[in-house]
Image (cartoon, rainbow, N blue to C red):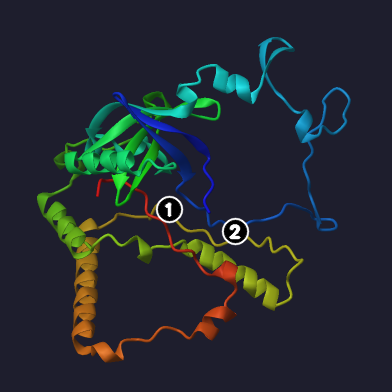
Amino acid sequence: MARAIWKGSISFGLVSIPVGLFSAETRDEISFRQLDKRNLAPVGYKKYNKQTGKEVELDDIVKGYEYEDERYVLISDEDLKRANPEKTQTVDITDFVNLEDIDPEYFDKPYYLAPLKKNAKAYALLREALKRSGKVGIAKVVIRSREYLGAVIPHNEVLVLEILRYPHEIRGVDDLELPGDELEKMGVTDREVKMAEMLIDGMTAEWDPSKYHDTYRDDLMALIHKKIESGQTEVLDETPAPEVDAEPKGVIDIMSLLKKSVEATSKHRAGDDEEEEERPAAKKKAAKPAAAKADKPKSARPAKPRARVRKSA
C-alpha cells in the first residue's frame, strides 16, 4: 500500500479536507555503482566529523543554522513544525485560476492528494467543483523545511498537487539569441510556413502516453547485455563514440526538406490506412507468448510511462 509522504488538509475558505500526499512519479533509471577501477570494489561514502575525522552515526547528526562564523542554532524536526504548525499541515488554497493561464515552465513535480479516513464526500465535492468550473486551486504548502507554490488539479478520480516554480526560479531568456517575429527579414516565406503547417497536420495524432518510452535506456541495456554475452564485463571500452553534427554544414534548403518530409509522412499514413483496411480483425498480430517475454531480463523491459497532468478532466 502507498505510504503518505505528508499528512494534513486541503483548506479553502472555511472548508478543511484531511488528505495525504503521495508521490505521483516513478523513476526507471539504470542504477550504476561507483567502483575503484583497480580492484572493482564498491566506493562508499562516510559522514565524518571534520574535527576528529571519525565517522558520525546517523542518529548523532542534527540540523544547524550558522548565524555567525562557526556558531550555530540547532533546529529539530519539531522546530520546523513549531515555526508555523498550520502551514506545515495545510494545502492552503488562496486563489482559483484557469489552468491554461499557467505557463508550462512553472510546472515542476506532481503529487497525488488522497482523502484520509471518512472524508470522501468533501474530497469528491472539491474535485467535481473544480472539474465543472474548469479551474485549479493555487495553494501554498510546506513540505519538509520549505514552502512551495502548488496547483490543485482534478484528473479523473484524483486530485493532483502539481508543485509550481516561483517566478524568481525561472531564468529569463534575455541572454539567449532568439529570432524575432520579423519573418521576412529572416527570409521565412508564407509558402514555407504553410508547408510546415502541412507537415504538422500530417504528423498530428491523438495523445497516447503509452506509446512513448525511454528508448535510450533500451539501447544502453542492449549494450550492457552485449558486454555480458561477450564476456567483456570487467573491461573499460574508452574508444571515442562517433560524433554527431549538431549543426548541419552548408546552406539548408528548408523548402526541399519540408517537401520530402510531407511526402514521406503522407506515404506512411497511406500505408497504415491500407494495412488497417486489409487486415481482418481475426488475423491481427498475436501477442508474444508469456515464455518469450519471460526470457527478456526484467531490467531490459521498459516500464509503462506515466503521463504528467496538465489539464482538467
Picture layout, residue 39 above or below residue 17: below
Q: Residue at x 50, y 62 (%)?
A: 216
Q: Residue at x 85, y 58 (%)?
A: 39
Q: Which of the 4 image quarters holds residue 10?
A: top left
Picture layout, residue 134 above or below residue 39: above
Q: Position of residue 166 (x, y in %)?
A: 39, 27
Residue 143: numbered disc? none
Residue farthest front in this picture: 118
Disc 2 designates what residue? 30
In terms of depth relative to the viewer, which is nearer, 16 or 256? Answer: 16
Q: Is residue 94 left or right of residue 116?
A: left
Disc 1 designates what residue? 246
Specify the amino acid type for callout 1: Ala
In terms of depth relative to the viewer, which is nearer, 210 or 12? Answer: 12
Q: Is residue 219 left or right of residue 225?
A: left
> How many other residues sit within 10 Å of disc 1, few (<14), some (14-19) or many (≥20)?
few
Q: Is residue 289 left or right of residue 297?
A: left
Q: Position of residue 293 (x, y in %)?
A: 52, 80
Q: CA distance from mark 2 to mark 1?
A: 26 Å
| Residue 1 visible in the shown view | yes
Specify the amino acid type for callout 2: Ile
Provide the secondary structure element on which disc 2 rests. loop
Picture layout, residue 144 above or below residue 277: above
Q: Position of residue 239 (x, y in %)?
A: 66, 62
